[in-house]
Image: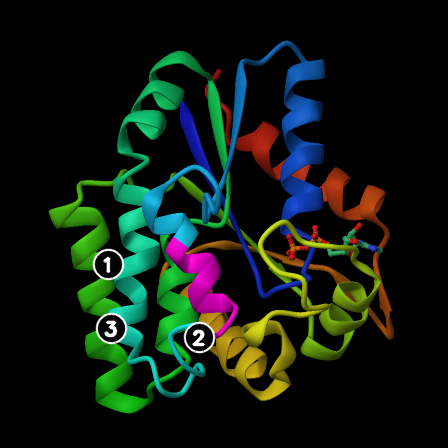
């Protein structure tokens, strides 16, 4: 059985960077590691439509109901089920740069109270029970406040799915604040490992964060 790791956090929190670092670290230690990244914008039929959604082709964030939006992200993983199965069957560790919790946090952020809770339950039921996607053994939450995350996004170059400097979600700081709030709630409720990426007023270095993540993962590896 492989260790299935999800790396979560708001846009610009360093997920892609840290997922790649962890993957390289594990391989350097002789582990068989697989690195997956969701959404799979280019590789799945759903992923391509997610690109359209994030570029505003189906309307603004407020006009697309979160339940309908969640179908695209869940569908992208459903379409990737075989890939996930093969990865877990052939590797000691599978790292996902974003997973089910990204859908939960991003769609959950668009509702509140009972509506939010129902939406969260519904998405988790869809992905885990209906689509039978495996649950992560370890979820690493990279916690960065929105201001620092937006500074990192501004520095980030071109994306492969949008020409805009920041896509619809990233452009909206208030939305990202709500996403972070849902993530913080989930981290508490679901016993995730939170990695505090900001120290005082500065974002910790990539090396510092990578070392903390490596230690957490080493401790979670069997034997
Ligand atoms: P995400 O995948 O969460 O959106 P990225 O890993 O793409 O975030 O990081 C966003 C940008 O910030 C990238 O240009 C990356 O090189 C840079 N970055 C990531 N982590 C750090 C860090 N700890 N310190 C400085 N820059 C960082």
Indicate yes or no: mark 2 CB to ligand 1 under 8 Å.
Answer: no
Q: How is the image coloured?
A: rainbow
- CB atoms at circles 3 and 2 under 8 Å apart? no
Task: Report if the beta carbon of the residue with label 3 is closer than 8 angstroms to ligand 1.
Answer: no
Q: Residue at x 74, y 73 (%)?
A: 150
- Residue 196: image quadrant is bottom right
Between tags 1 and 3, which lies in front?
3
Report the side of 202 relative to 19 (left or right). Answer: right
Where's ligand 1: which quadrant? Answer: bottom right
Q: Which of marks 1 and 3 is nearer the N terminus?
A: 3
Q: Residue 120's image quarter?
A: bottom left
Q: Can residue 1 be seen in this view?
A: no
Q: Write down the residue under mark 1.
A: 124
Query: From the viewer's perspective, is residue 46 above or below residue 43?
Result: below
Q: Spatial distance from mark 2 to mark 1, Cα to Cα?
A: 14 Å
Instruction: Indicate the secondary structure of the residue bearing disc 2.
Output: helix
Question: Which mark sits nearer the N-terminus, 2 or 1?
Answer: 1
Q: Name the residue under label 2.
A: 182
Q: Residues within 10 Å of mark 3 (few under 14, many from 20)?
A: some
User: Which disc number belongs to residue 67?
Assistant: 3
Q: Is residue 74 magenta?
A: no
Badge 2 density bin: few <14, some 14–19, many ≥20, Cα 10 Å: many
- The residues colored magenta run 49-56
């Amino acid at each position: 059985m492989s260790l299935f790791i999800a790396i979560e956090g708001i846009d610009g929190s360093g997920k892609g960077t840290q997922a790649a670092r962890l993957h390289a670290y594990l391989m350097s230690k002789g582990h068989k590691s697989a690195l997956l990244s969701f959404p799979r914008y280019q590789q799945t039929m759903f992923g391509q439509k997610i690109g359209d959604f994030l570029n505003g082709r189906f309307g603004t964030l407020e006009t697309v109901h979160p339940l309908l939006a969640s179908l695209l992200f869940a569908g992208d993983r459903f379409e990737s089920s075989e890939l996930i199965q093969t990865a877990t069957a052939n590797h000691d560790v599978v790292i996902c740069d974003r997973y089910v919790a990204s859908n939960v946090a991003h769609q959950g952020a668009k509702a509140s109270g009972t509506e939010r809770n129902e939406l969260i339950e519904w998405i988790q039921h869809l992905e885990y029970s209906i689509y039978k996607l495996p649950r992560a053994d370890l979820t690493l939450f990279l916690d960065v406040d929105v201001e620092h995350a937006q500074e990192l996004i501004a520095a980030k170059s071109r994306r492969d799915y949008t020409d805009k400097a920041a896509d619809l979600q990233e452009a909206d700081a208030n939305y990202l604040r709500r996403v972070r709030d849902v993530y913080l709630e989930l981290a508490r409720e679901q016993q995730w490992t939170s990695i505090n990426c900001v120290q005082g007023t500065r974002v910790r270095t990539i090396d510092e964060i990578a070392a903390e993540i490596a230690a957490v993962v080493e401790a979670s590896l069997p034997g």
